[in-house]
Image (tube, helix red, strand yellow):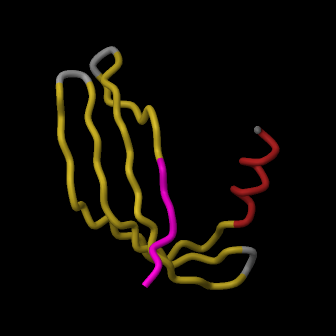
Amino acid sequence: MDELFTTLGRSFSDCTSYVFELQAYDVAGDMAYTAGLEHTSASVDGVPRTYTLRATQVYRREEGRWRVAHRHGDSVTE
């Protein structure tokens, strides 16, 4: 897994824009979630791209701090 994420990390560079468009959220005790659209402009393998991902993150409060427990993102088809 380390090699996969290292390779993936190398493929992205030069982020020129990132906007998170929040569509839904909730907090219940020590758990929370956000759901929305991530609008990004960055280079992928050296090629400039602009794309939108539908993204959901689940958070868990641990020792008074919020941490991401799960993330899912997928491409938005138009």
Left or right: 32, with 6 as reference point: left
Number of labels in the image equals 0
Q: Position of residue 70 (x, y in %)?
A: 46, 38
Quadrant of image for the N terminus: top right
Q: Position of residue 62 (x, y in %)?
A: 35, 18
Q: Where on the picture, by quarter, is residue 36? A: bottom left
Please name the residue shown 45% across and 67% down the image.
53
Near-viewer residue (58 or 50): 58
Q: Where on the picture, by quarter, is residue 59? A: top left
As drawn, 8 above or below 49: above
Please name the residue shown 35% across and 66% down the image.
37
As drawn, 65 above or below 59: above
Near-viewer residue (67 or 70): 70
Left or right: 77, with 27 as reference point: right
The magenta region covers: 72-78
Near-viewer residue (13 or 50): 50
Please name the residue shown 50% across and 78% down the image.
51
Left or right: 47, with 63 as reference point: right
Quadrant of image for the C terminus: bottom left
Q: Position of residue 76 (x, y in %)?
A: 45, 74
Left or right: 63, with 3 as reference point: left
Residue found at the very far top of the displayed protein: 63
Q: Position of residue 9 (x, y in %)?
A: 69, 56
Q: Where on the picture, by quarter, is residue 35? A: bottom left
